[in-house]
Image (cartoon, rainbow, N blue to C red):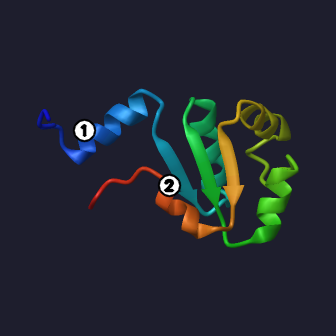
Amino acid sequence: MPHDSASPFDRLLTRIGEKSARVGIIGLGYVGLPLAVTAAKGGLTVTGFDIDPGKITRLAAGESYIEAVSEADLAEVAAAGRVAWTADFAQLSGMDDYPC
């Protein structure tokens, strides 16, 4: 088996560049929601996490509650299958990580 000399950071950067990284955004407020949508529009697969199930319900229905994110943006990334919204933080285990 060949030895992989790339660091965990380099492997993560490669996955991001290849658009194969599984990205988790924690907190879907004024920073997190626009970040999640921007990453998804950039071709990454994103799961947005929030403790407020009301936000998850609204996002799943395609409804934005933040002026910086349009419902058209939500529809675009949803149609592309690049976003998921959840309050289930156990799903964090499915995201790519970088050991700190």
Question: Mark 2: few, some, or many residues within 10 Å (few <14, many ≥20)?
Answer: few
Left or right of residue 58, residue 32 in this image: left
Left or right of residue 59, residue 40 in this image: left
Name the spot of residue 64 as percent of width and height, x first. 82, 50
Name the spot of residue 27 as percent of width and height, x first. 61, 63
Which amino acid type corresponds to the residue marked 2 in the rendered image? Gly
Looking at the image, which residue is at 38% across and 54% down? 97
Q: Quadrant of the C terminus?
A: bottom left
Is disc 1 placed on a helix, strand or loop? helix
Name the spot of residue 83 as percent of width and height, x first. 67, 43
> Where 42 sits versus 78, above or below?
above
> Where 3 sits versus 55, above or below?
above
Looking at the image, which residue is at 16% across and 37% down? 4
Q: Quadrant of the N terminus?
A: top left
Which amino acid type corresponds to the residue marked 1 in the rendered image? Asp
Name the spot of residue 2 as percent of width and height, x first. 13, 33
Answer whether residue 35 is visible to the viewer in this image: no
Kindly identify which residue carries mark 2. 94
Answer whether residue 91 is visible to the viewer in this image: yes
Kindly identify which residue carries mark 1. 10
Alpha carbon separation for disc pair 2 and 1: 19 Å
Q: Earlier in the sequence, mark 2 or mark 1?
A: 1
Front residue of 63 and 96: 96
